[in-house]
Amino acid sequence: MKAACASSGHRRRKVFLFLAMVFLAIGVAATGHGKEIDDLHALILRNPSNIELNLRFARVAEASGIPRWALAAYERVLAEDPQNLEARQGIQRILRGMQPSFTLVTAQLGAAYETNPRLYLPPKRGELLGIGSLSLRDERYVADTRWRTSGLLAGQVHQKNGELNYGYAGFETGPLIDLAQAWRLHPALGAAAAYFDHHFFYSEASASATFEGSFDGALQALRLRAAYRKYDDFFPSSEGFYADIRGRFAALNVLGDGSIAFLSPWVLWSNISGSVINVLVTELQPGAYLEWGARLEVYKSLAPWLTVGANVSAARRSYRNDVVPGTGDTREDIIFIPGVTLIFPNLIAAQTDLRLDYKFIDDHSNDPAKRFTDHFVSATVVSRFDPFAPAMPVPR
């Protein structure tokens, strides 16, 4: 019995010794610059405000896989030199490297009433429609690179005009690359397809580059995008390239605490052959034209249960091939869309809001046959969730 116990104890000591050697090897590998770090740390203790010593310490700590030590050193540098570029970039790099992976799904479902869904085509009669969307934003590390994937499913179902039923599916994916001064670049490749008028509508492939950063705590972004779209043979439009530049710039507290404003300008160039589809179902109309415009949105929280918003969009679209009958002028449209929003946060459940929207669409074209106005009011439930998060236990 004693021999068995002794043998068991001997095996445990061998296992313990083996594990200790493994952890020691891991520690040595992780801190291959261990002596250099110790020497630099001793020097910093005698002169903690020395910028060069702290930068050297931070570089070695990052190379050794100890980002928290490097972060502390970079912060000491900024305390002495707030504009030090290497320290600012180092902090940005480390904090982003510490960001956890996440998946955010936003589901929106509701109903709307539109007074003129056929726009400039008869008959002009209002109708109810169901609207819904499901969007995805996923960020995680692939090897040592932060990767973002975005996706969207959206659709409309009309009560009377079934030929206006519309569906869309698209995604983009690409890495996030750190740039100077707290900016980063998101190059992405994407694909999309749509359904309309009981037919496959179009397919497209795209490439984009988005520059995004933060100013006074608010996210700013500028996206350059080019795409090739091909319409189904059923429709008068054919295929071609289009490109756009879109910005989204935010400002906090423009109307006091709890407010935010967004300015979203854009320039769009389209060279899609064929005639224009007769309905305004997407932001991009097929055809050959140049469009420029902007959208301004302002939101303010009046109470924990109520956020109000107002918005206005204005755009000018100049067609190259569409000719106005009777005058011979090329077609030009000026589109004006004001709107208001009421949001009731967490009204139905946590992260589930009730949203009420109204917008008025006025397309003033130099072609009288293409002018129209339209009113659109909607009520939707918006829910945000992580599909991979563990479910909360139900209280008993």
Image: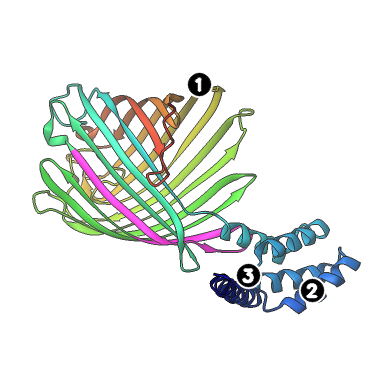
Q: Is residue 389 left or right of residue 360?
A: right
Establish if 361 lies above or below 12. Answer: above
Q: Is residue 308 left or right of residue 374?
A: right
Q: Residues within 10 Å of mark 2 (few under 14, many from 20)?
A: few
Q: Are marks 2 and 3 in contact (CB under 8 Å)?
A: no
Residue named by callout 3: 65
Residue named by callout 2: 38
Q: Secondary structure at mark 2?
A: helix
* Kind of residue at badge 3: Gly
Between 248 and 34, the one lying in front of the other is 34
Q: Which mark is residue 184?
A: none
Q: Secondary structure at mark 3?
A: loop
Q: Secondary structure at mark 1?
A: loop
52 drawn magenta: no
Q: Outermost residue toward the left?
A: 234
Stretch in magenta: 166-189
Q: CA distance from mark 2 to mark 1?
A: 54 Å
Task: From the image, give the main secondary structure of the stretch colored magenta.
Answer: strand
Q: Earlier in the sequence, mark 2 or mark 3?
A: 2
Residue named by callout 1: 305
Q: Is residue 386 left or right of residue 192?
A: right
* Kind of residue at badge 2: Asp
Q: CA distance from mark 2 to mark 3?
A: 15 Å
Q: Outermost residue toward the front?
A: 1
